[in-house]
Amino acid sequence: MSQKASDRFFHILSYFLLSIGSIMMLLPFYWMIVTSIKIPSEIIAFPPKWIPSVITLQNYQRVFRDLAVGVMYRNSAVVAVTKTILMVFTSALTGYVFGKFEFRGRDFLFSSIIATMIIPLQVYMIPLYVMMVDFHWHNTYTGLVIPYALSAYAMFLVRQWMHNIPSELIEAARIDGAGELHIFVRLILPLSQAVLATLVIFYFMWNWNDFLWPLIVLSSPQKFTLPLGLTVFNSEFGNDYGATMAAASLAVVPVLIVFFIFQRHIVEGVALTGLKG
Amino acid sequence: MATEISQRDTAGAIESRKAKRGSLRVSQRRFVWSVLFPCISFYLLFRYYPFIEAFNISLRKYSIVVPDKPFVGFENYVNIMKSSVFRISIGNTFYYAIVTTLVGLVVALAVALMMHSIPRLTNFYRAIFFLPQITNAIAVAMVWSWLYQPVYGLFNQILQMFGLPSIGWLTSPKWAMPSLMLMGIWGGIGMSIIVLMAGLSGIPRVYHEACMIDGGNRWHVFWHITLPLLQPTITFILVTGFMGAFNVFSAVFIMTHGGPLNRTRVLAYHIYQRAFVDLKMGEASAMAFVLFLLVLIITIFQMRVLQTRWEY
């Protein structure tokens, strides 16, 4: 077989396999949405109904009746936005300090912070929870956000990025009489835009989906974030498949839309920083 | 590769400047410490203190609702070592983490190679495989619970259509763990694919052509050129993927509650349950420390592997 023919054969095979793979990747999403708009008899019909003959919104009405979807969206948004802004800002500051300043004990301090990354949450969650109770921060967003106001990983990525910013620029700004804070805000932040944008997208996604710490800290349902609300809904109405799929759709679909808008940015961000969830 | 070199150059430039520069000026020092002071306080208060306190708790009979927390020495550690459920959960955790990481890597590598070779639609396929990554893990677990449902679930209905016997995906001791793994792989490969494709695009095309001219076929190119050059990327995926899978929690929490017969009881879930449901916080802390030691050993082992330089 000639090289060209072999290439063509390989391409066709690739397209074929990738299409099958894509169908398998999309199937759970498709089935979720389809189930959510089916009437009960078609949800459990055999053979499975791939396309519903009647479209109903009764499952969604059920969800809106029993789950405060709007409140949970607002809670999740408030928490995720606050946490993300805090984390990215503090990481930019600390990453800059560790990347561009020489001071005694810098490397020791840096490694001591990086070392905390390997402590699993399971190890310190109990004392941290006890601390939240002592501070009267349990069941508050303060308790949810403050213990995660800094991120060693994000700080590490910003510090790596600092190699791309020439120290001469900072030196020149100093000679022009710029204050340190001014240099950070007017010079470092704009020059770090690419890495900070990536961090914003990823930390927003992770914070939006965060589960274990909110599960421990929050106790009153009106403060629940979306993942917690879904958990409660699922344990109460787990057998109402139409309703659970409607609830899941409500949680998933808006995020999918945002993803398709920022798709290129997100994918390039992963390649840029080697981030891993 | 190129960025690595330029980074090293900049680092070199910084080194040489370090010699010229003396200590920081007053304004700089003030800035540095006004950033570092809150930062150090944060890590001492919210990471190092709870870490040490967790060890203290692990040496006590500790429940948050009982004010008396007597010191019992290493009794908790002795008890958990004797507990068969704890040993099972360690085994389950390794089983889950190893299988999902390795199988996930192989699948992701195959998909990434195909996506890299095709002339069109690469972005489209990449976005589709990435979808589960951005989806709420709880919602994903709810959807898969429905797919795995024993009677009306889609998977068993499809099996039935082909006249095959139903499978107790989440209810049979034999299938529960593989079912969770399948979902874990489905959810995780998107990220690996993107990282692998970034690695693939860093391999110069001429290497492939040189190998082809020397009479190599696709398999030769893959085995002798692509795979060795992807080594750092693959190691990265194995390290991060393993750590993520080692801490799997929400899938178990929503879908199986550790059952049936503890077959899906993983450490993260077991610790959570003992601490916040059974309120045995001393015992849970002892288990968490064992988890920490395991993570530490694995990390050190993986760092060793990471530092090994492969010869091309």
Image (spheres, coloured by chain):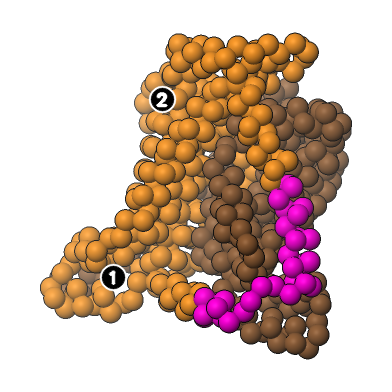
Chain colours: A brown, B orange
Q: In 3D space, how far apart are the residues under numbered discs 2 and 1 (Cα atoms)? A: 46 Å
**Magenta span includes B237:** no
| Residue with the mark numbered 1 | A8
For the question of whether residue B5 can be seen, the reply is yes
B23 versus B105 height, above or below: below
Identify the residue at image location x=64%, y=85%. Answer: A168
Query: Which image quadrant for residue A245?
Result: top right
In the rendered view, does A142 fall on the left or right side of B81? right
Query: Which image quadrant for residue B82?
Result: top left
Identify the residue at image location x=61%, y=54%. Answer: A109
The magenta stretch is B13-42
Q: Nearer the viewer, residue B235 or A39?
A: B235
A204 versus A124 height, above or below: below
Instruction: Say how many tags the image has.
Output: 2
| Residue with the mark numbered 2 | B91
Please check whether the numbered discs 2 and 1 fall on a single chain.
no
Label 2 element class: helix
Give the amino acid type for the residue marked by disc 1 in the picture.
Arg
Question: What is the chain letter for disc 2?
Answer: B
Query: Can you tell which of label 2 and label 1 is closer to the viewer?
Result: 2
